[in-house]
Amino acid sequence: MVVKRLKKSREASIGDRIRPIGDVESFLTMLCYGKAGTGKTVFGCTWPKPLLLLDIKEKGTESVIDVPGIDVLPIESWDDLEAIYWELKDRKLKKDYKSVILDQLTAMQALGIEKFRMENGMEAGDVLSQRTWGRVSGLMMEWVYNYRQLYTAGYHICFNAHERLREPQEEDDDRIAPSVGSNLMQSVASFVNGSVSVIGNTFIREKELDKKKTEIQFCMRVGPHAFYAAKIRRPVSAGPPPSVLVNPSFDKIIKISKGESLKKPKRK
């Protein structure tokens, strides 16, 4: 079969867009998931300011109410989600935001379900058909992709989500143990995992300082794990990333992704 040559455009050659990989400006795209109260919103608000927090029916902003540089937009419907996306994409907002946090994807999925229920005149308790579930999945993947692509407009993007334990099913030939990931439809969860450069799982642990004292630590898994979904893309030459971060922050994630060490150099 003969491949037809594309018509020449008046624009510059596509080859003119080729650059050394080190010159490519990168913006962080991340999924942060965990149980309620494990520090997802607090972590998100360590990101560069000014920051826009899209509060998708989460109502969890009390923990960051005293953090400067953060604006909150309550998202009450799917139309809200689409409307603010276009405002961000076209840079039509009054502030030049550097980061956008979607808090959280699990509630975003619920808005998608609500959207299709309303369009089909369904009641809250009506069972969705397999076809409708497929449409919800497609809608979620489309708009997660759209928001992820906002990094091309110069935004850092963080998706928050609640966590979910998944037991292996009979059709899962390659998975024989339970796994923990975001509380989303399996197709959407897999799509989100592949679309972001970092996946972090937040959790709380107690560290024993001595026989009488313990310390509560807010932590995040970022290194590869057999049970929890976690990853962080970084130079191969830098070696494996740390498995767990204590008091995770945007700056720590950026340093790790660049292959830098979080350990302070020892004084000579």
Image (cartoon, rainbow, N blue to C red):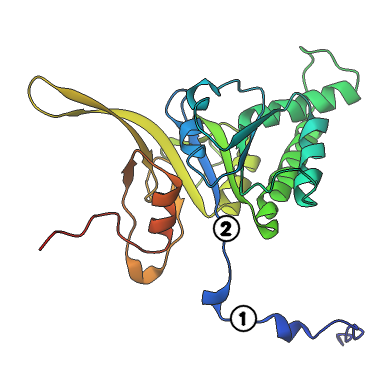
Observer-nearest of 113 and 38: 38
Q: Is residue 260 above or below residue 113?
A: below
Observer-nearest of 107 and 130: 107
Residue 221 visible in this rendered orientation of the protein: yes
Report the residue that reaches farthest toward the left: 211
Q: How many marks?
A: 2
Q: Mark 1 and mark 2 in contact (Cβ < 8 Å)?
A: no
Residue 105 horizontal/vertical position (percent): 63, 34
Q: What residue type is labelled 2?
A: Phe
Please give the name of the residue rendered at 61% of the width and 31% of the height, measured from the top-left corner. 104
**Mark drawn on residue 64:** none
Please give the name of the residue rendered at 46% of the width and 59% of the height, measured from the top-left corner. 233
- Mark 1 lies on a secondary structure that is loop
Q: Is residue 80 above or below residue 143?
A: above
Query: Image quadrant of residue 158?
Result: top right
Of labels 2 and 1, earlier in sequence is: 1
Please give the name of the residue rendered at 33% of the width and 60% of the height, measured from the top-left corner. 240
- Mark 2 lies on a secondary structure that is loop
Residue 264 horizontal/vertical position (percent): 23, 55
**Mark drawn on residue 27:** 2
Label 2, label 1: how far apart the Cα atoms are: 17 Å
Q: What residue type is labelled 1?
A: Arg
**Mark drawn on residue 19:** 1
Residue 193 horizontal/vertical position (percent): 56, 48
Q: Is 207 situated left or right of 257 in this image?
A: left
Residue 35 horizontal/vertical position (percent): 46, 26
